[in-house]
Structures are given as C-alpha cells and as structure tokens.
Image (tube, rainbow, N blue to C red):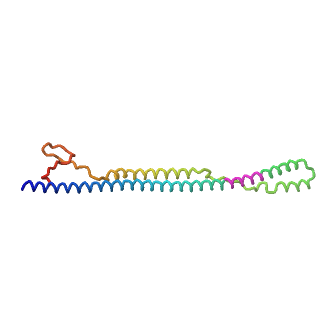
Amino acid sequence: KQLLEIQRKSKHVIQEKEKELQDLKKAVESHKHSAQTAVQETEMIFTQLIKYFEGRLSEATRLISAQEKAAVTRAEEVSKRLEKEILELKKRDAKMEELSNIDDPTYYLQIFQSVTVGVFTLPTITLSPVLTFEDVIKSVSQLKEKLEELCKSKFEKIPKGVTDVQIVPPPLPTFQPSHMKLSTTEPKRGINSY
C-alpha cells in the first residue's frame, strides 16, 4: 500500500515536471520572440531618429545657404553701387583738377556747381554687427550637449530593463542555519517534499 502511494506521488511529480518543462519551452519561445521584436523595434526607432536628424540637418543647411546667398547678393549689389559712386567721384575729382586751370569766372562757376552738387551727401554704408553664423553653431552645439545628456540618462535605464527580463529568475539567497553561510543554490528536494 505504501509503494502505491509513493508511485502515485511519483507520477504526480512527473506530470508536474512535464508541465513545467512545457511551460519553460513556451517561455523560451516567447522570450526569443520578444527579444527579436525588441531588436527590430529598436532598429526602427533609431532609423526614424536618424532620418529625423538628417531632415533637421538638411533644413538647417538650406536655411544657412539661403541666408548666405541673400546676404552675398545684397553685398554684391551694394559693392557695385559703391564702385559706381567711386568712379563718379573720381570723374568729379578730375573735373575739379580742370577747374584750377580755368580763368573764365562764368565758366568756372558753371562747372564748379555741376561738380560739387551731391558730393558730400552720398549715403554711407553701415555693416551689420552680425557677420558670422557663430550663434547658429553655438545653438547647434548646445542642442548636441542637451541631446547627449538626455540620451545618457535614458540609455542608463536600458541595460537594467534588459537584465530584468528573465525566463527563470535566479534563485534567491538563503541562509543555511546549520552553517550560517549565505547560499544561492536551490534547496534539494526529495520526492516527499512535493
């Protein structure tokens, strides 16, 4: 009678262990699938981030190039105007040289008035105080620093999140009173412990 009871318990333990094995195999498959999904999602998210930043880079480059072109075009227009003004002033200066050789006062006055009109009323050119894109570079550098800080703080959480995912948790440390030492092994169980 005792043998039958032990056999019954043994068969029960076998069934439980077979169920545990099946559950473990399912858990392993689920874990593998979850890991593959996590890798694919992570790659997709990083690809999206790269595309996002490439778009921002393209936009910033376009803005800088457009501003450079507009500013250079404007400066070239002003430069041409200045060159014309300088040429005109040199012509007037040459005529003033001629004035010093004229003896006829009437003719002198006519030429003098035509040469001196508007000489001292030409507009002056004022250069902009902001000639470089240093503020843009500074802003982009600050953005880089903030993104690096953010990424560092968020990435520190990833390894913990990865290591927290377990199929079978590691055994808990237990104290063995007879030896008073810490053990991380699972307690041995006999058939009667089930």
Is residue 131 rendered magenta in the image?
no
Residue ID at (60%, 55%):
62
Q: Nearer the viewer, residue 40 or 112?
A: 40
Placement of the N terminus among the 4 image quadrants: bottom left
- Please indicate whether residue 171 sits to the left or right of residue 150 in the image: left
Residue ID at (77%, 50%):
86
Image-quadrant location for residue 36: bottom left
Q: Position of residue 81 (x, y in %)?
A: 75, 54
Q: Return the residue found at the far left.
A: 1
Q: Nearer the viewer, residue 7 or 96?
A: 7
Q: Position of residue 10 (x, y in %)?
A: 15, 54
Q: How many marks?
A: 0
- Please indicate whether residue 29 sits to the left or right of residue 140 in the image: left
- Please indicate whether residue 139 sits to the left or right of residue 193 in the image: right
Q: Nearer the viewer, residue 160 or 66?
A: 160
Q: Position of residue 28 (x, y in %)?
A: 31, 53
Q: Position of residue 72 (x, y in %)?
A: 67, 53
Placement of the C terminus among the 4 image quadrants: bottom left
- Please indicate whether residue 125 sits to the left or right of residue 24 in the image: right
User: Would you say the magenta stretch is mainly helix, strand or loop?
Assistant: helix
Q: Nearer the viewer, residue 143 or 39?
A: 39
Residue ID at (33%, 54%):
31
Read off the magenta span.
72-85
Residue ID at (15%, 46%):
176
Is residue 73 rendered magenta in the image?
yes
